[in-house]
Structures are given as C-alpha cells and as structure tokens.
Image: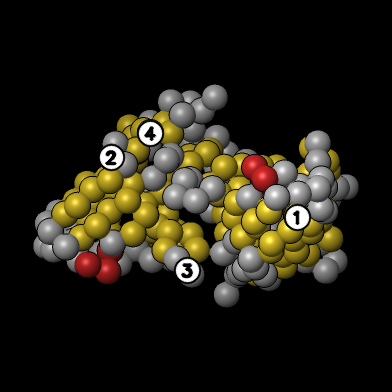
Amino acid sequence: DVKVTQSSRYLVKRTGEKVFLECVQDMDHENMFWYRQDPGLGLRLIYFSYDVKMKEKGDIPEGYSVSREKKERFSLILESASTNQTSMYLCASRPGTGYGYTFGSGTRLTVV
Amino acid sequence: RKEVEQDPGPFNVPEGATVAFNCTYSNSASQSFFWYRQDCRKEPKLLMSVYSSGNEDGRFTAQLNRASQYISLLIRDSKLSDSATYLCVARGGAGSYQLTFGKGTKLSVIP
C-alpha cells in the first residue's frame, strides 16, 4: 500500500512564526498536493506539484509557499502564521492524472 | 467556477436500509470521477472510482451520467460501520492535475 506520511499529527504555533509541514510518500508518485479542510468549506487546494521542483498555485495559495526538492517530499510553509490558518492540513499524492489521491493522516494546526 | 455539488445531509438511516447519494459537477470536460469516504477526524480514503458504464463493489454501486453531469453512489444493506461523510470528486479536463471535491454528504446508520 502507498504510504503518505505527514510529520506531525497535531501542532500548536504562535502568530508570526514560520511553520513547516512535511509530507513524504514512498511510491515514487509524480503528483503531490496540499489541501486544508475546514468545517463547512470542504477541502481547498493550496498548492500542488506535478514533478520535482515544479509547483503550481491552487485555489488559496496566499500566505503559503511550498518546496519540492526531492520526488518523495513536498513541504508546505506558512511564512508568518496567522490565526486564520488554524485548520486541518492534508497532503496527498498520486501516480498520474487518471488516478485518485492517497492522503496522509493530516496535521491539525492551531495558531494562537 | 468549476464545482462539485452535494447534498450535505445528514442522512440518518436504519441498519439494512438502502441509501443513495447524488452529486452534480459543473465542468463538462471532467474526465475522472471518484467517491471518497471520510471518517470523523480522519483523512479521506478512496472508496471507488466511477466509470461511465457504472461499477459495483460489494454493497456499493456508482453511476455516472455524463449528459446530466451527475454522479451517484448507492449503498445497499447499510451497516453501522458505513457511518461517515462521503465525498464526490471530479477531475478537470485533459491536462488538469487537480481533483475538485464536493463538501461531502454525512451518513449516520442507526441501529
């Protein structure tokens, strides 16, 4: 089975801190994605990457950046955390465009 | 705006009932479709892909109607363990990388 591993399950950070969320997949997948999920808003795409060093903005990229230096790792960076970035963050990967995603177990981030 | 619309529910059904979820998508160029299941405070997990000819996996049947831009999921003989939120998902047209998720339909199966 494909494994998508997110480094932290729960995280509490202070306003203004720089926050790194890490995601690693073990199946040589091309495409990787970062979503956030909030009650009533569903899953919203932040950024995605279709190959190493490639990145594309999703629907809500403001306040975030990403890094994909190696195929298996896709990092989400909150440049200066704010309370409205408190959310569940989900990383996903897949082998190609015709396939569904495999999600990591999520990081529940609280910014205080 | 490209969207996937679902009835949020909740659907409260007794064990053994048959329940159907419907979903519409706005992007006529969408090419791949899926149903995901999400348990409370867990990540979404792929339940099944949806094919034009319709497909079945045990108690679950998925249908796609491209003309009406409509997807359905039928669950027969509901179990308590089927209680979850079901997400309808569509991929955009050729060359599109991301999936668009509906907000989900909540199902509670009651004894």
Going by the picture, which residue comes out furthest to the right? Answer: B53
Residue A54 numbered mark, or none: none
- Which label sits in the foreground, 1 or 3? 1
User: Can you see residue A58?
Assistant: no
Asked whether the residues under marks 2 and 1 belong to the same chain, the reply is no
Q: Residue at x 54, y 53 (%)?
A: B98
Residue A8 numbered mark, or none: 2
Judge by depth and name the residue closer to the eye, A30 or B99. Answer: B99
Asked whether the residues under marks 4 and 1 belong to the same chain, the reply is no
Q: Indicate the amino acid at tag 2.
A: Ser
Q: Which residue is mark 3?
A: A41
Q: Which residue is mark 1?
A: B14
User: Can you see residue B66?
Assistant: yes
Q: Give the quadrant of residue A101.
A: top right
- Which label sits in the foreground, 4 or 2? 2
Asked whether the residues under marks 3 and 4 belong to the same chain, the reply is yes
Q: Which residue is mark 4?
A: A5
